[in-house]
Amino acid sequence: MKYKMLVLDMDDTLLTDDHTVSNENREMLRQAKEMGVYVVLASGRPTPAMIDYAKDLELLDSYMISFNGAVITDLKADKIIFEQTLTQEQIHELYDYSLKSKTHIITYLDGKIVSETDSEYIEIEKNITGLEHNKVLSFKDEVKSAAIKCILLEDPSYLKEVEKDLRAAMPHLSVCMSKPFFLEVAQNGIDKGASIKFLAEKLNILQSEIIAVGNAGNDLTMIEYAGLGVWVDNVDPELRDKGDVIVASNNNHGVAEVVRRFILN
């Protein structure tokens, strides 16, 4: 099988635990590109928190999926080709739910993280994205427009229970875990798998010609959609049997292994 698109989750998949790209991964991606394969970064991260990696990996002639699929950017043309937001009313509804469920909530406005509260988990998001944190007195007063997504944040064991409850309470929204302490919420129908389908159809690439690589719940739809769905070895345990292949971990150049085994060969 000749694969034409390689879709990569970033955190805990392409990136090592210190948020860098290993030399092994970098070199294999260069070779994949030379063979004409579209290398597409697909992350829950906001777009501004991905662009430096795209530049570093020389992917500015490709496409990028951010916000868990809610935004697709044509990097070569420097324009958004797909975007779907939550309404102000939905975000306010999620805020009310966060109060009831005793979770922290953040959204993103004007390139900043917005919340009413501080949390060790918000600090992690600040560290991952490099975005400024705008802590406000009133979340609802600050959010007076649509926004791309929200994240509910709390201790992993508790947040797993919140995930089940939120899915039942708001079936009209898309809910997934990106990290054990990040419960991400987007507009109905928004996920990485749907966005890969949109992009593949635009580029006339068949489903069978796509490899997707991930590690977490927010990657599941793209792992299931791709012709070859690959987990890195540090995948969440409950997801291990839901892909086609498991490769080395994010800290052991799993992405490089994918390219060597399935693209170069």
Image (cartoon, rainbow, N blue to C red):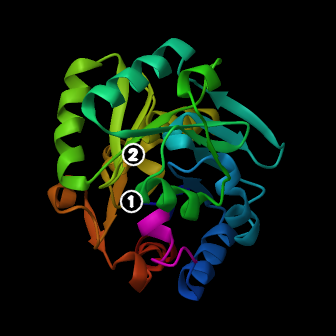
User: Is residue 122 rendered magenta in the image?
Assistant: no
Residue wearing tag 1: 214
Q: Alpha carbon of mark 2 to alpha carbon of mark 1: how far?
A: 8 Å
- Left/right of residue 31 with respect to residue 163 in the rendered view: right
Q: Where's the N terminus, which quadrant?
A: bottom left
Q: Are marks 2 and 1 in contact (CB under 8 Å)?
A: yes
User: Is residue 17 rendered magenta in the image?
Assistant: yes
Amino acid beneath label 1 = Gly
Amino acid beneath label 2 = Met
Farthest right residue in view: 77
Checking the image for residue 222, the label placed there is: 2
Q: Nearer the viewer, residue 116 or 245?
A: 116
Element assignment for label 2: helix
Checking the image for residue 191, the label placed there is: none
Q: Nearer the viewer, residue 161 or 188?
A: 161
Above-or-below relation of 217 to 165? below
For the residue carrying disc 2, how many other residues have a C-alpha within 10 Å: few (<14), some (14-19), or many (20+)? Answer: many
Pinpoint residue 207: horizontal percent, then vertical percent. 43, 42
Pinpoint residue 2: horizontal percent, then vertical percent. 49, 60
Q: Where's the C terminus, which quadrant?
A: bottom left
From which residue to which does the magenta span run? 11-20
Magenta stretch, main secondary structure class:
loop
Above-or-below relation of 158 to 110? below
Q: Residue at x 83, y 43 (%)?
A: 78
Marks 2 and 1, the one that precedes in the sequence: 1
Q: Residue at x 65, y 29 (%)?
A: 82
Above-or-below relation of 20 to 41? below
Which corner quadrant of the image does residue 193 belong to?
top left
Asked whether residue 201 appears in the rendered view, the answer is yes
Element assignment for label 1: strand
Pinpoint residue 110: horizontal percent, then vertical percent. 73, 37
